[in-house]
Image (spheres, rainbow, N blue to C red):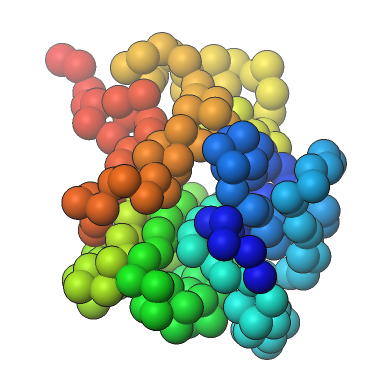
Amino acid sequence: MTDRNTALVTGGSAGIGAEICRQMLDAGYEVISMARRAPDFEHERLHAVQLDLLDAQAVKQAGVELAAKHRITHIVHNAGVIWPHLLPDVTLDELQGLTQIHLGSAISLVQSALPAMESAGFGRIVLMSSRGALGLPTRTAYSATKAGMIGMARTWALELAPKGITVNVVAPGPIQTDMFYDVIPAGSEREQNIARGIPVQRLGRADDVARAVMFFSDPKNSFVTGQTLYVCGGASVSSVTI
């Protein structure tokens, strides 16, 4: 084990997760990426664990093994999936799948790292929710589980604050990632309309979100916990103009 702060980042192989890994490496962290594939870049302090977060047993086992090998001080649960359907087409299997990815895997990984954090009297936990937690068409299962992350983080914040562990949430709006473009065609009129509908008049970038994660992760920021920061260009407060 190393005395260096070690961050476990889920979904660290691409998009927002990869940018979080890069910014943490630049800040001197040891970083573990947990995702279905390895990041497309290398670093002497970057480690990759490849698994599917849908596999609850694999996630639990990986958490135990990583906690035995590393002194994990930070957990950034960034991994997420959008399975968009209008209400008549939503399935309980999809709800259960997103519950495991967004909530269950976070619980397992934090449980594994918690004893070391409590022993050290220090820890930083950041959960990645979404602007969609406030409601969005075709997002029944996604919105439900992303909103659940906010409630879960607030509960953890209360339980863990006396132990020096903070728990916060970053909730991005529309961000230019592969996951966004899986739902919205790149260069389409729909993409342009979404950008025009955001108060700052642009889509977000992965680095916009990663900087918010870095704020919550900073060891000096011990007086901020249980909070949700919407990185959404004002989309969470905008309304119809009359």
Residue under the image location 82 percent in, 39 percent down: 41
- For residue 235, above or below residue 45: above
Foreground of the two, 176 or 65: 65
Among all residues in the image, which is located at the extreme left?
242
Q: Is residue 131 above or below residue 152?
A: above
In which quadrant of the rendered image does the N terminus lie? Answer: bottom right
* Residue 203 percent across, percent down from the top left: 50, 22
Residue 118, image quadrant: bottom left
Residue closest to the eye, 198 or 26: 26
Residue 25 is drawn in which quadrant? top right
Q: Is residue 162 visible?
A: yes
Q: Tell me what residue is drawn at x 54 percent, y 15 percent.
A: 192
**Is residue 210 rendered to the left or right of residue 41?**
left
Of residue 22 and residue 10, the one placed in the foreground of this image is 22
Query: In the figure, residue 56 lies in which quadrant?
Result: bottom right
Q: Residue at x 36, y 24 (%)?
A: 233
Q: Indicate whether 174 appears above or below 199.
A: below
In the current view of this chain or complex, which residue is farthest to the front? 3
- Residue 136 visible to the viewer: no
> How far across and down, in percent of the image, does residue 96 sit?
54, 77
Q: Nearer the viewer, residue 107 or 116?
A: 116
Q: Residue at x 32, y 17 (%)?
A: 199
Residue 22 location in percent, x, y? 65, 37
Image quarter in which the C terminus is found: top left
Q: Position of residue 68 (x, y in %)?
A: 65, 82
